[in-house]
């Protein structure tokens, strides 16, 4: 709603240089102020004095505004009249004879005002959504490992580069006690905020069960039960869980419907750590088997999500598992975090367009004690 007041005189704020004659029209909140200033003599603007200004003031209650301004001495040319659009209007002039129109909102101006309010509400809604998404991003970032448990014979690390502000990829490192390290990577079904919420649920389930249970198979059965009970029928996650024994260099794992882990031996041979069970959260009755490998200094393990292998170039060709293996072989002599950075750089150089899926990679290198 527009509601205007008229003020005039030298020296009022905001105003022209002292001594000039002027008229100011302002909204009550001061957000808009129209100044009419006496032009210099014999100027082009001076010649326009006394002519119609083509300035129109629109108000919700034109009759009330007409009465108010009439009582304050505004000179109207005629009483309120009805336009062809149905809106009431009149014309008034200032001390110099410049004329202005005063009108009420017709269907058109009401539509413009409604559109303005709708646009403002949309902008505010988008601002709140961006703010809430930024908060969600910060919260999820804290769910990833903030520190690495100390292990003598393993150099390891991980990274998750999200395609959106939040995502459904998950990786973790757990201190299982008894010189054992838990390595976890998962991929939640879905995208965006819904997947991020499920990711937080899965992370909480894994950490809770890791505290209560000592062996991988019963631990994962408990994780599946909690995830199944607490999510919808269509929600599930692929999950790769591994337990590394620092003393024995023993790597025990369960691959629950996840992409095959890659074990690059020191002699350059490759072993795939294939699926040993079903995805978690989709079936009430659930089981998995446990695979085992003994690691030697120089062996490197890579766990990853499909954001790496399914990254594609301009021709639609995927990065694929083979390029990932080649990248690992090329950079295998680097420390774990440097190897991760090099592999991710290879993926990003291959796929120069917008990232479409989360990129998550965990690397563990067996080293001498």
Image: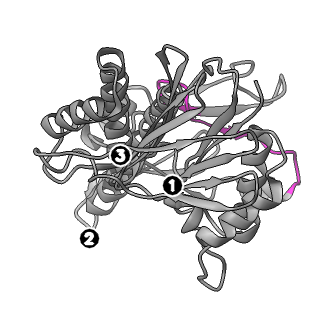
Which of labels 1 and 2 is toward the front?
Answer: 1
Residue 131 visible (yes or no): yes
Which stretch is magenta?
25-43
Which of labels 3 and 1 is toward the front?
Answer: 1
Mark 3 residue element: helix
User: What is the spatial separation of the Cα atoms under label 1 and label 2, in whole angstroms?
Assistant: 67 Å
Residue 34: in magenta span = yes
Residue 104 visible (yes or no): no
Q: From the viewer's perspective, is residue 204 above or below residue 25?
A: above
At which x and y percent is residue 316? 59, 82
At which x and y percent is residue 251? 52, 37
Q: Earlier in the sequence, mark 1 or mark 2?
A: 2
At which x and y percent is residue 137? 50, 34
Q: From the viewer's perspective, is residue 292 above or below residue 257?
A: above
Disc 2: CA contacts within 10 A as few (<14), some (14-19) or many (>=20) = few
Disc 2 target residue:
84
Instruction: Confirm or deny contact between disc 1 and disc 2 (CB under 8 A).
Output: no
Disc 3: CA contacts within 10 A as few (<14), some (14-19) or many (>=20) = many
Mark 1 residue element: loop
Disc 1 target residue:
305
* Residue in the foreground of this view, choosing between 302 and 253: 253
Disc 3 target residue:
195
């Amino acid at each position: 709603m527009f509601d205007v007041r008229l003020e005039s005189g030298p020296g009022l704020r905001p105003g022209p240089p002292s001594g000039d004659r002027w008229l100011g029209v302002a909204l009550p909140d001061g957000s808009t102020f129209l100044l009419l200033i006496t032009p210099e003599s014999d100027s082009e603007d001076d010649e326009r004095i006394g002519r119609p200004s083509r300035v129109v003031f629109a108000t919700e209650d034109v009759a009330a505004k007409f009465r108010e301004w009439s009582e304050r001495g505004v000179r109207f040319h005629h009483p309120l009249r009805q336009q062809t659009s149905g809106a009431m209007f009149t014309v008034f002039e200032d001390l110099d004879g410049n004329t202005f129109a005063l009108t009420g909102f017709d269907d058109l101006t009401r539509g413009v005002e409604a559109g303005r309010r709708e646009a403002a509400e949309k902008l505010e809604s988008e601002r709140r959504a961006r703010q809430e998404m930024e908060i969600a991003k910060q919260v999820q970032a804290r769910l990833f490992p903030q520190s690495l448990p100390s292990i003598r014979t393993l150099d390891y690390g991980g990274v998750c580069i999200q395609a959106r502000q939040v995502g459904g990829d998950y990786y973790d490192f757990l201190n299982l006690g008894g010189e054992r390290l838990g390595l976890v990577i998962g991929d939640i079904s879905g995208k965006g905020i819904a997947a991020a919420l499920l990711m937080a649920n899965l992370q909480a389930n894994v950490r809770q069960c890791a505290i209560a249970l000592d062996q991988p198979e019963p631990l994962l059965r408990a994780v599946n039960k909690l995830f199944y009970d607490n999510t919808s029928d269509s929600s599930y996650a692929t999950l790769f869980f591994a337990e590394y024994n620092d003393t024995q260099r023993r790597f025990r794992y369960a691959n629950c419907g996840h992409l095959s882990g890659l074990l690059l031996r020191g002699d350059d041979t490759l072993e795939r750590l294939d699926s040993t069970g079903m995805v978690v959260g989709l079936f009430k009755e659930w089981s998995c088997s446990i695979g085992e490998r003994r690691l030697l200094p120089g062996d490197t393990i890579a766990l990853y999500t499909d954001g790496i292998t399914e990254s594609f170039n301009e021709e639609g060709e995927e990065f694929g598992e083979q390029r990932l293996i080649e990248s690992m072989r090329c950079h295998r002599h680097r420390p774990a975090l440097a190897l991760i950075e090099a592999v991710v750089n290879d993926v990003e150089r291959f796929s120069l367009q917008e990232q479409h899926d989360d990129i998550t990679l965990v690397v563990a290198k067996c080293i001498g004690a």
